[in-house]
């Protein structure tokens, strides 16, 4: 799981380029980019796990719904916690952080990156 953690490291590096004033990231561009890269790390972790399970690169998910299906089928049998965590990371990192640019608080962004790291380590 080196590659997903490298994505996360890159996200933190990108985030460090933003100025901080009163625990708020000033530059949206860096926050949005960092959230997007961190989310890609989460997806990469899922893909690596699926490849270890025997799926081919061609069979890897191509949409968020396909990732959810793969999590249900190969990762979270009898355990909905992993799915809830993925859904939360999707909402926070991808939608709020990257897509809509709604995240500015250093506390919230750092917590989201920490949760992404936990998810990655959990499935590795």
Image (spheres, grey):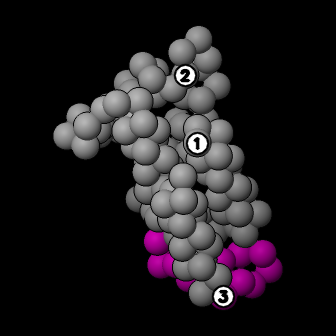
Q: Residue at x 19, y 40 (%)?
A: 58
Could you tell me how far apart the alpha carbons at marks 3 and 2 are, in whole angstroms? 39 Å
Q: Position of residue 3 (x, y in %)?
A: 48, 60
* Image quarter hosting the C terminus: top right
Nearest to N terminus: mark 3 or mark 2: 3
Front residue of 120 and 23: 120
What residue does disc 2 label? Answer: 76
Q: Is residue 46 magenta?
A: no
Q: Secondary structure at mark 1?
A: loop
Q: Position of residue 101 (x, y in %)?
A: 49, 65
Q: Is residue 29 magenta?
A: yes
**How many neighbours does mark 3 have within 10 angstroms: few (below 14), some (14-19), or many (20 or more)?**
few
Nearest to N terminus: mark 1 or mark 2: 2
Front residue of 30 and 28: 30
In the figure, is residue 67 to the left or right of 18? left
Q: Secondary structure at mark 3?
A: loop
Nearest to N terminus: mark 3 or mark 1: 3
- Is any part of residue 44 visible from this angle? yes
What residue does disc 3 label? Answer: 19
Up-down relation of residue 2 to residue 120 (above or below): below
Q: Viewer-nearest of labels 1 and 2?
A: 1
Q: Quadrant of residue 80?
A: top right
Residues marked 3 and 2 touching at CB (< 8 Å)? no
What residue does disc 1 label? Answer: 124
Span shown in magenta: 18-33
Q: Viewer-nearest of labels 3 and 2?
A: 2
Q: Residue at x 46, y 28 (%)?
A: 71
Q: Residue at x 54, y 52 (%)?
A: 1
Q: Quadrant of residue 65?
A: top left
Q: Position of residue 27 (x, y in %)?
A: 56, 82
């Amino acid at each position: 799981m080196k590659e997903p953690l490298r994505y996360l490291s890159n996200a933190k590096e990108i985030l460090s380029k933003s100025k901080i004033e009163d625990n708020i990231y000033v530059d949206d561009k860096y926050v949005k980019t960092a959230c997007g890269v961190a989310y890609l790390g989460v997806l990469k972790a899922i893909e690596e796990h699926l490849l270890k399970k025997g799926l081919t690169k061609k069979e890897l998910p191509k949409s968020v719904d396909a990732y959810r299906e793969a999590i249900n089928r190969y990762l979270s049998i009898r355990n909905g916690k992993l799915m809830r965590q993925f859904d939360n990371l999707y909402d926070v990192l991808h939608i709020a952080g990257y897509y809509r640019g709604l995240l500015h608080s250093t506390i919230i962004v750092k917590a989201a990156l920490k949760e992404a790291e936990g998810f990655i380590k959990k499935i590795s």
